[in-house]
Image (cartoon, rainbow, N blue to C red):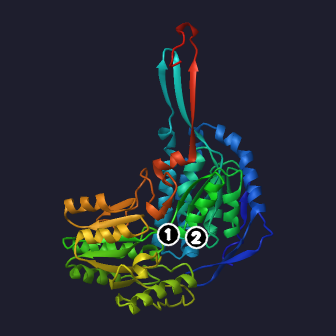
Amino acid sequence: MLYPEVRNYVAGNFINSSAETLEIISPLDGSLLSTVPLSGETELNEAVKAAQQAFPKWSAMPIKERVQIFFRYKTLLEQNLEELTELVHRENGKTLGEARAEVEKAIELTEFACSLPQLVAGEILEVSAGVECRLEKKPIGVVASITPFNFPNMVPHWTIPNALALGNCMILKPSEKVPISANRIAELLTEAGLPAGVFNVVNGAQELVEAICDHPDIAAVSFVGSTNVAKIVYRRATSNLKRCVALGGAKNHIIVLPDANIGLTAAGVAASMSGCAGQRCMAGSAMLGVGPIDNIIEKIVEEAKKIIPGENLGSVISKEAKERIEKYISEAEKAGAKVLVDGRNAMVSGKENGYYVGPTIIDFVTPDMAIAKEEVFGPVLAIIRAKTLDEALQIENKSEYGNAASVFTQSGGLARYVMENASAGMIGVNVGVPVPREPFSFGGWNESKFGTCDITGKSSIEFWTQMKKTTTKWNPEAGINWMS
C-alpha cells in the first residue's frame, strides 16, 4: 500500500476499528492506496460523545478567538499545498492541475471562515426607554457532514471551516472511495490548534450514513452526492427532527446562440464538459444549440480533440463508472445521435489498469434520450438542437435538476433573458462553470438541492447557527408600557 491504513479520528486521536475494511484503489492506474474501515453505529457514538464533550468549551470561546485557529490552518494548507494536491490526484484521479485548484478553493473557503466575526456581529436596539433588544447567532451543537468522492478536499471545506468557526463540533463522513485526504485535514486542523473532539472523522458507507441521520444527538446534517441519495438523506434526517441541506445531482445546460464568440465558446464548453473528467455537479453536460451554430460545434470538436486522457484529462473514479458512462454513449448512438468525438475504450500507456474515458461529443441528441435527461458524470457533451431561444429554455426548464445553466452570446439583452428565465440556482454568461466565489454561496434549485440555505458563503451562516433574542430593562423609574 502506498499510504498507511485509514483510521477514524476521534477526540484528537487516530483509533483502530474492528469493522470490515475496504480497499482504496487509485483510479489512475488501479494500484492499491490503502484500506478504510466501514464503521457503523458504535464508532459513530464514540465520535458524537467526543464532540459533545468538546462543545461547551468550544462554543463558549469568542468567535474572534476561534477563527485564529483557522488563520493558522489556512497557512498550513498553503504550506502543504503540493502534498494535498498529490493526495487528491492519487485517490480521485484528477489531473495535478485540477487537484491543485481544488485545494486552492479549500484555502479560499477557509479564508472566508476567517471573516465570519465581521459577518455575525449581533444586533442591538433600544426599543423603548431603557429597554434593549439584542440578537446573537449561536451554534447549534454537534453536526455532521457527509461528502462525496469527486472533491476529496474542497467539498469537506464547504462545511468544516464555517461550521466550526461558528462554534459547532463536527463529525465528517468522507466518501469511502477517497478517505485519505480527510485524515490529512484532521491532522492539519489539530496542528493549527483545534481542540480535541471539535472535529472528528468516521469512515463508512451506507450503514454509517443511516446512523448519522438517526442519531438523536446530531443536530444538523449536510450531504453532497446523487439526487436519489440526497432525497433519502433529507427525508430521513428531517424525519428525525434535524436540520438538513442535501445537494444532489445535476444536468446543466449550456445555451449557445449563433452570435457567440466562437473561440471563447468552444474553449468554455469543452472545459466545462471535460473538467474533472466530467465528475462534478457543475459540468456542462448538455449543450442547447440555437439556430445555425455548425461553425461553433466544429470549433468545440477541435478543442475536445486537444484533451488527452492521462495528460490533461484525468480518470473517472472506478471501472463501474467507466462502464456506465460508455453505456450512455452507446445507447445514444443506437437511438440515432451522431458521435462526433468518441471517448470510449480510452487507454493510457503505462496505466492500462486505470479508468479512463476520453472526451466525447454527441450531436443530434433529442430531449427524450437518457443522455439528455440523466446525469452521466463523465466527460460527455450531448448537443441538442433548438430552433429558438424559447425552445431551448423550455428544454432547460423541463429538467428535474436545477444546479446551473449558462449562455454564450454577445447580446446583453439575450443574456438577461436567459438569466431571468432559466430554472437554475447558478447562472453563467459566457462562463461554462458558473461556480460563485466567496462570499457568494453555492447551491442549486429543484432536485439539485433539498433544504433551505446554501452550503457555502453567507447563506450557510443561517444553517449552522440559531438566533438568541434577549430583552433587558434596568430603569424602573421609566415605568412600563406596551413595549416594555
Position of residue 118 relative to residue 330, above or below, is above
Which residue shows up at 64% across the image and 56% down it? Answer: 239
Residue 99 is marked as 1
Report if residue 15 is visible in the image: yes
Residue 147 is marked as none
Residue 362 figure quarter: bottom left
Which residue shows up at 51% across the image and 50% down it? Answer: 460
* Residue that badge 2 annotates: 87
Report if residue 205 is visible in the image: no
Position of residue 269 relative to residue 345, above or below, is above
Residue 263 figure quarter: bottom left
Q: Position of residue 333 (x, y in %)?
A: 39, 90
Q: Are marks 1 and 2 in contact (CB under 8 Å)?
A: yes
Q: Position of residue 85 (x, y in %)?
A: 53, 68
How packed mark 2 is, by other alpha carbons closer than 10 Å (few <14, some 14-19, many 20 or more), is many
Q: Is residue 157 left or right of residue 213?
A: left
- Of mark 1 and mark 2, the one earlier in the sequence is 2
Q: Position of residue 159 (x, y in %)?
A: 56, 55
Between residue 442 and residue 112, name the one nearer to us.
442
Q: Is residue 295 left or right of residue 65?
A: left
In three-dimensional space, the C-alpha distance between marks 1 and 2, rounded to whole angstroms, equals: 8 Å
Type of the residue with mark 2: Leu
Between residue 18 and residue 422, name the one nearer to us.
422
Between residue 480 and residue 431, name the one nearer to us.
480
| Helix, strand or loop under label 2 | helix
How packed mark 1 is, by other alpha carbons closer than 10 Å (few <14, some 14-19, many 20 or more), is many
Type of the residue with mark 1: Ala
Q: Is residue 289 left or right of residue 215?
A: left
